[in-house]
Amino acid sequence: MICIIIVGVILQPSDAAPKNPSEKYKACFNNCVADCKKFEGGGETFCEMKCDSDCTAKEEADDLNIKLP
């Protein structure tokens, strides 16, 4: 019984996305999705995944004072 509880706690999934994304992230994401759909002709899922990756990288780089191209 104890093993099952321990394994259950260890294997419990965690959320990858932040619970409360910053305003900077939200603005980046919303602009990116709009541009992606308009100029790249991407679908909803493609644009959301692309923009989540791009905006997360930009936010993390900004937090670490790293300049991205």
Image: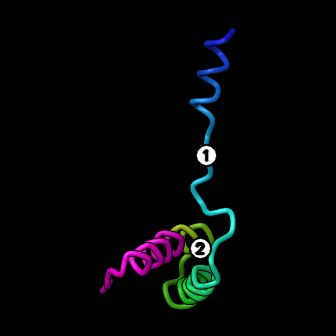
Q: How many marks?
A: 2
Label annotation for residue 63: none
Question: Which residue is labeled 2 in the image?
Answer: 43
Q: Is residue 55 magenta?
A: yes
Callout 1: SS = loop
At label 1, which amino acid type do we have?
A: Ser
Mark 2–mark 1 contact, CB under 8 Å? no
Magenta region, residue range: 50-69
Residue drawn 61% across and 21% down?
6
Give the residue furthest to the top.
Answer: 1
Q: Which residue occupies the foreground of this view, 58 or 5?
A: 5
Residue drawn 55% across and 89% down?
35
* Location of residue 69 (image quadrant): bottom left
Q: Within 10 Å of the Cα at label 1, are there few (<14), some (14-19), or many (20+) other Cα atoms?
A: few
Q: Which residue occupies the foreground of this view, 63 or 46?
A: 63
Question: Which residue is labeled 1 in the image?
Answer: 14
Residue drawn 55% across and 74% down?
47
Residue 49 placement (x, y as % from top left):
53, 67
- The mark that comes first in sequence, 2 or 1, is 1
Measured in 3D between alpha carbons, the distance from the residue under mark 2 to the one under mark 1, in whole angstroms, is 27 Å
